[in-house]
Image: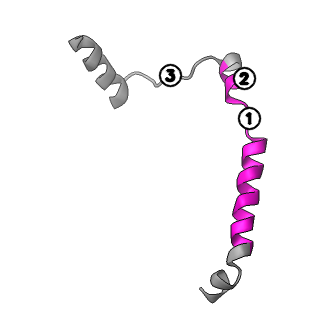
């Protein structure tokens, strides 16, 4: 625990660097959707069944 407190600024800087790297290196989701199409949830999942129930009431 003392090591974490001693190196807190180094750990914080490391988190910022890792976050920035992941943000920069992540794929463009708009390009992925354009190439692969919209991703949908398979039938039978609770969220799909709930949406069907909501649409049925309207």
Q: For the residue carrying disc 1, how many other residues have a C-alpha within 10 Å: few (<14), some (14-19), or many (20+)?
A: few
Mark sitting earlier along the chain (2/3): 2
- Residue position for label 2: 31
- Residue position marked by numbered label 1 in the rendering: 27
Q: Is 28 within the magenta?
A: yes
Are the residues at dot 3 and dot 1 in contact (C-beta closer than 8 Å)?
no
Q: Are marks 1 and 2 in contact (CB under 8 Å)?
A: yes
Residue range (magenta): 10-33
Mark nearer the N terminus (3 vs 1): 1
Q: Position of residue 54 (x, y in %)?
A: 27, 19
- Identify the residue at horizontal 31%, vertical 23% (top origin): 49
Q: Residue at x 75, y 51 (%)?
A: 20
Q: Main secondary structure of the magenta part?
A: helix
Query: What SS does tag 2 mark?
Result: helix
| Image x and y of residue 31, in percent | 72, 23
- How far is mark 3 from mark 1, CA to CA? 19 Å
Between residue 10 and residue 22, name the one nearer to us.
Answer: 10
Q: Quadrant of residue 5?
A: bottom right
Instruction: Decide: few, some or many residues near mark 3? Use Cα within 10 Å; few <14, some 14-19, many ≥20.
Output: few
Q: Which residue is mark 3?
A: 40
Q: Residue at x 77, y 50 (%)?
A: 21
Q: Nearer the viewer, mark 3 or mark 1?
A: 1
């Amino acid at each position: 625990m003392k090591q974490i407190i001693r190196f807190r600024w180094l750990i914080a800087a490391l988190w910022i660097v890792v976050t920035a790297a992941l943000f920069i290196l992540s794929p463009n989701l708009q390009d992925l959707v354009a190439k692969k199409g919209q991703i949908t949830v398979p039938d039978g999942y609770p969220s799909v069944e709930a949406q069907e129930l909501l649409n049925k009431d309207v």
